[in-house]
Amino acid sequence: MADISDPNINEAYLDVRSDKSETNWLLVDYESDRSDKLTLTATGTGGLDELREHLDDTKASFAYVRIRYSNDKESQREKFILVVWIGPSCKVMRKAKISVHSADVKSVLRVFSIEVPAREKDDLKEEPIVIKLRKAGGASYDGI
């Protein structure tokens, strides 16, 4: 079981969800290689591009991101995604625990449209994620 009791995580989660805040992502990492305690390590306003810069190839992490996109000429949508990052050089035991710990993380980072598993930074490019969000959102009048 993961320890996700760090109050900074919930505070950052509420900040990302707030319409009054420009913060649009948060990153949660393990305190150390041997620890199951998760801590907030970063937040930002630069979206997926900025988040990718903070991901470590040797770590497994969780991120929560607000994505704004146009549905058509007249409307904007905001959706939230949960990113489960397993870096290409992440240790085997950490990889093994991440799926079990995901359930604990989802008890705090609870409202999201899709979960995005990422093994490489290119897995977090905005365009393919927006396409998945459109498909998950129901009716599409753009033929996507």
Image (cartoon, rainbow, N blue to C red):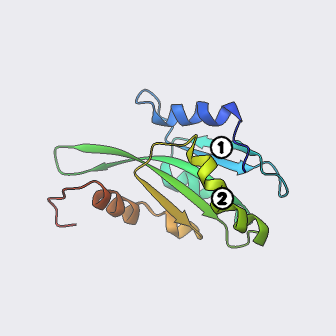
Residue name at image x 18 percent, y 56 percent: 139
Residue type highlighted by circle 2: Val
| Residue at the spot 58% in from the left edge and 50% down from the top edge | 63
Q: Is residue 18 left or right of residue 2?
A: left
- Report the residue at 24% width, 55% height from top: 138
Left or right, 3 with respect to 76, comes to right
Give 80 or 96, whichever is nearer the viewer. 96
Image mark count: 2
**Residue 2 pos. (x, y %):** 72, 49
Residue 115 position in % (x across, y down): 48, 58
Mark 1, other Cα within 10 Å: few <14 / some 14–19 / many ≥20: some
Report the residue that reaches farthest toward the top: 20
In primary-sequence order, the first of circles 1 and 2 is 1
Decide: is 16 above or below 58: above
Tell me which corner region of the image, top left, top right, bottom left or bottom right, holds residue 88: bottom right
Q: Is the residue under label 2 in contact with that under label 1 (CB below 8 Å)?
A: no
Residue position for label 1: 42
Residue 54 visible, this angle: no
Q: Amino acid at mark 1?
A: Ala
The residue singled out by tag 2 in the image is: 100
Residue 56: x percent and y percent? 70, 61
Residue 122 in picture, x, y percent from top left: 52, 69
Asked whether, in this view, residue 70 is left or right of residue 118, the answer is left
